[in-house]
Image (cartoon, rainbow, N blue to C red):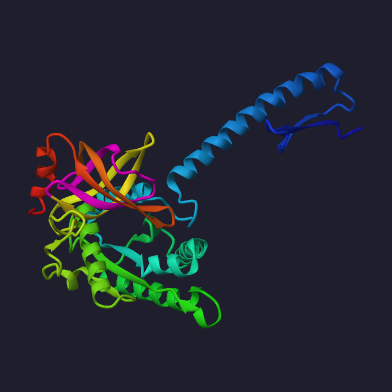
């Protein structure tokens, strides 16, 4: 008496797991009749159902923007955020940085130590990146063993400092193997800065990608900037033994193909492009394909605004790379004029 009456009803999901408690308080003691209890129990069931649906929706949202393995943001979320950042900074011309990061010799890690070891490396990298970026920066898994970091503010000097700090900490803290086989994991990093190397998302990614390529060609385990990568690409043209066609790098400073989405098993899956030719391309995907399959595709091109062309490709070759990745060779089907229009931007 003097305290009143409190009715507490557990809020349970469909599996009977308690998600919380539904409390009803009345100022008068012993004021809950049996019918009141039945009424509030029915209300609690509706509340529990609404909460469960909200939790499921939030989980689906999180899965859409997060990479399960590394705990970093997804590629799509990263590109969307970068576009918003670019839109805001175009008005102020305030510089910001972009880092593209690639794990050195990652295929050897999977081949020599197994795919679980490779997964542990990627997970450790995700944790390390989240722990070593500032509030406001954003780290994402771009595809396979490639990562990207958007530095919310700062010029080239700050970006290079952050990249070198990250490179050094990875080398000193992440290892694979045991005993005599134990060795450090290293990364290579390419750096680009807005607005010096471009005014679009495509140009910024392209410049950082060229800097990353330079870091790889110069011996790996190092940081290079876009300004160091302005010389002509060292592999401007080369032959592919598989396709016997002239291939050129996809990413160029002033245009080309940004990325390609393939519709595999009813879902749009991003494909990391490695080479292109007059009749197709070579790339990496995270879903299995078989030679002879016909796959719809969206070819996203670089330019003043992002756009894509809808095409269909025939899978000519497919090879499992490990870490749930597959190398594929794709040939364009039907009228190839749309594909040729994409290629004219990169001088094929």
Q: Give the quadrant of the N terminus.
A: top right
- Residue beneath the point at 43% across and 66% down: 111
Q: Nearer the viewer, residue 175 or 14?
A: 175
Q: Residue furthest right?
A: 1
Whether residue 215 is visible to the viewer of this picture, yes or no, is yes
- What residue range appears in magenta? 278-305
Q: Nearer the viewer, residue 19 or 280?
A: 280
Q: Residue furthest bottom?
A: 180
- Residue beneath the point at 50% across and 79% down: 181
Where is residue 322 drawn, in percent x and y?
42, 57
Work out whether 313 lies above or below 129.
Answer: above
Work out whether 298 lies above or below 343.
Answer: above
Q: Is residue 300 magenta?
A: yes
Where is residue 320 drawn, in percent x and y?
38, 54
Where is residue 193 drawn, in percent x and y?
24, 64
The answer to which quarter of the image holds residue 10 is top right
Q: Is residue 133 magenta?
A: no
Q: Residue furthest top?
A: 35
Work out whether 35 lies above or below 268.
Answer: above
Where is residue 4 drawn, in percent x and y?
86, 31
Work out whether 55 lies above or below 348.
Answer: above
Total marks placed:
0
Is residue 4 found left or right of 155 in the rendered image? right
Whether residue 306 is visible to the viewer of this picture, yes or no, is no
Is residue 169 found left or right of 308 in the rendered image? right
- Residue beneath the point at 28% across and 37% down: 295
Q: Nearer the viewer, residue 16 or 149?
A: 16
Is residue 216 found left or right of 254 in the rendered image? right
């Amino acid at each position: 008496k003097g305290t009143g009456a409190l009715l507490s009803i557990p809020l349970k999901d469909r599996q009977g797991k308690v998600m919380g408690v539904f409390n009803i308080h009345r100022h008068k003691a012993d004021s809950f009749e049996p019918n009141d209890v039945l009424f509030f129990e029915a209300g609690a069931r509706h509340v529990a159902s609404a909460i469960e649906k909200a939790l499921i929706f939030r989980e689906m949202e999180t899965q859409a923007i997060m990479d399960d393995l590394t705990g970093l943001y997804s590629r799509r979320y990263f590109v969307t955020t970068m576009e918003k950042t670019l839109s805001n900074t175009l008005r102020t011309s305030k510089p910001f940085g972009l880092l593209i990061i690639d794990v050195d010799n990652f295929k050897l890690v999977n081949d020599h130590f197994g795919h679980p070891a490779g997964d542990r490396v990627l997970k450790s990298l995700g944790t390390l990146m989240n722990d070593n970026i500032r509030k406001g920066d954003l780290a994402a898994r771009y595809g396979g063993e490639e990562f990207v970091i958007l530095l919310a503010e700062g010029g080239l000097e700050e970006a290079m400092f952050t990249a070198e700090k990250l490179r050094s900490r990875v080398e000193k803290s992440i290892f694979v193997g045991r005993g005599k086989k134990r060795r450090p994991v290293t990364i290579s990093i390419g750096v680009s800065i807005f607005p010096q190397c471009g005014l679009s998302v495509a140009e910024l990614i392209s410049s950082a990608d060229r800097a990353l390529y330079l870091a790889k060609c110069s011996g790996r385990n190092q940081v290079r900037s876009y300004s160091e990568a302005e010389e002509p690409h060292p592999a401007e043209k080369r032959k592919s033994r598989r396709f016997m066609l002239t291939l050129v790098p996809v990413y160029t400073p002033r245009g080309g193909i940004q990325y390609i989405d393939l519709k595999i098993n009813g879902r749009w899956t991003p494909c990391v492009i490695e080479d292109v030719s007059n009749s197709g391309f070579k790339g990496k995907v995270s879903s299995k394909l078989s030679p002879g399959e016909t796959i719809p595709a969206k070819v996203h091109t670089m330019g003043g605004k992002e756009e894509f062309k809808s095409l269909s490709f025939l899978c000519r070759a497919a090879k499992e790379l490990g870490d749930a990745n597959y190398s594929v060779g794709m040939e364009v089907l039907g009228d190839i004029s749309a594909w040729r229009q994409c290629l004219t931007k990169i001088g094929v």
